Image (tube, helix red, strand yellow):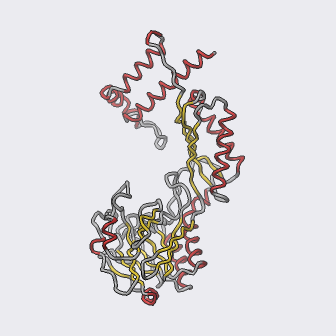
Amino acid sequence: MVYFLHAADIHLDSPLKGLGRYQQAPAEQIRQATRQALVNLVDVALERQVQFVLLAGDLYDGDWQDFNTGLFFVRQMARLREANIPVVLIRGNHDAASRITRQLPLPENVEVLSDQRPNTARHPVLEQLGVAVHGQSFARERVEENLVLNYPDPVPGHINIGLLHTGLEGYDQHAHYAPCTVEQLRNKGYDYWALGHIHARQVIQQERPAIVFPGNTQGRHIREPGARGCYLVQLDHGGRCELEFVPLDSFRWEVCELDVTGIEDTEELLHQFDSHVDHLRQQHPEFPLAIRVVLQGQTPLHAKLVADQEHWRAQFQAILVQQGEDLWLEKFQVATGQPQREIEPTDGTVVEAVMQSLQELRDDPQELERLAEQLRPLESKLPSGRGLHPAKLQYLQARLREAQQLLLAQLNREEGE
């Protein structure tokens, strides 16, 4: 039986994105989050007395701005060296050999597997344990060939572990780096596949061979919500595997999708949000949270919500402030709609005529394209990072739909007065 730690995608010193415009955001804590995750990783390895550590790529997020990033990693690995814990790592697409131009000597307990061909780590501790760790680093950012096909055969009498940074087919919706299939991993004859690259943790299978993505160690933006960390693994010579997920992060992201269907009272709306935040607090006790609020559903409040989003953003931010100093509003989105009301064709109202014109424009790609072309010079003059793209058809269709909703909301409000 061996006991080890499997982590990946540390992205050391990668900035957390999405809170820069908020003065209350804990800038220093955010800046240090990926470093703290590495410190926590080493703490867990020492406290749980693991026998070795595997890092499956993307230790860094590209070339360092200065040597402090590399020096920080060296200091943490030296802590493991003092406990005689070897570390085997490979480079992935973000820290490929071609991207990391600066180099520092690493402690002797750290072995970086070659980027020239698949090879096997031979640290004395691994030899004593009867463990063979096979793997290959990325030589360049885009490795599109299947590396697994050339991985060494299993070493007889050893526990065999494959260390691989991969866009596993069927599990990676983005770039397919070092692509391979689950069947190819199974057929290799190894006991465990320590994978990296996909940031959402996934246990593809736990029976021999276990195939595991631990996810990244620290969520860096709203598309990486929830707890992030590593796996502690117990593995015996028969291939039996026990996994324990251990969080390593120090700052978390969550999306609050609030269904406001039928809500007519603003007090009820804010109360529902307050209750939802309280639930998130219970899910992530003592963790700073950045929360994206998305309002959904059909509500008579739709016109108010759309017409004055800055006002409502402040209302929701105020609730977070009351709940705690470590909660921040990452983004506020109104995706609601007005309860449907039929407009009779014989109404002959100006609103109806405008609604029909807007709908015809939405449904006519050629007219939309002409409108986009007219707005193209305007797009270059708009501030970047605001999500304003008047020359894109999808953007125009969304804005036209919002205009229809506002007109319908105004018509309903006038009839109710």
Residue drawn 44% across the image and 32% down it: 398
Relative image position of residue 60 (x, y in whole percent): 45, 67
Relative image position of residue 377 (x, y in whole percent): 37, 33
Quadrant hosting residue 57: bottom left
Give the quadrant of the C terminus.
top right
Q: Is residue 299 left or right of residue 7?
A: right
Relative image position of residue 146 (x, y in whole percent): 28, 67
Residue 383 vertical placement versus 112 (above, below): above
The total number of labels drawn is 0
Quadrant hosting residue 61: bottom left
Q: Is residue 347 left or right of residue 122?
A: right
Quadrant hosting residue 94: bottom left
Residue drawn 72% across the image and 46% down it: 322
Q: Is residue 5 left or right of residue 314?
A: left
Residue drawn 54% across the image and 67% down it: 245
Residue drawn 57% across the image and 81% down it: 49
Q: Nearer the viewer, residue 228 or 366?
A: 228
Q: Nearer the viewer, residue 157 or 113?
A: 157
Q: Residue furthest right?
A: 322
Relative image position of residue 286 (x, y in whole percent): 67, 59
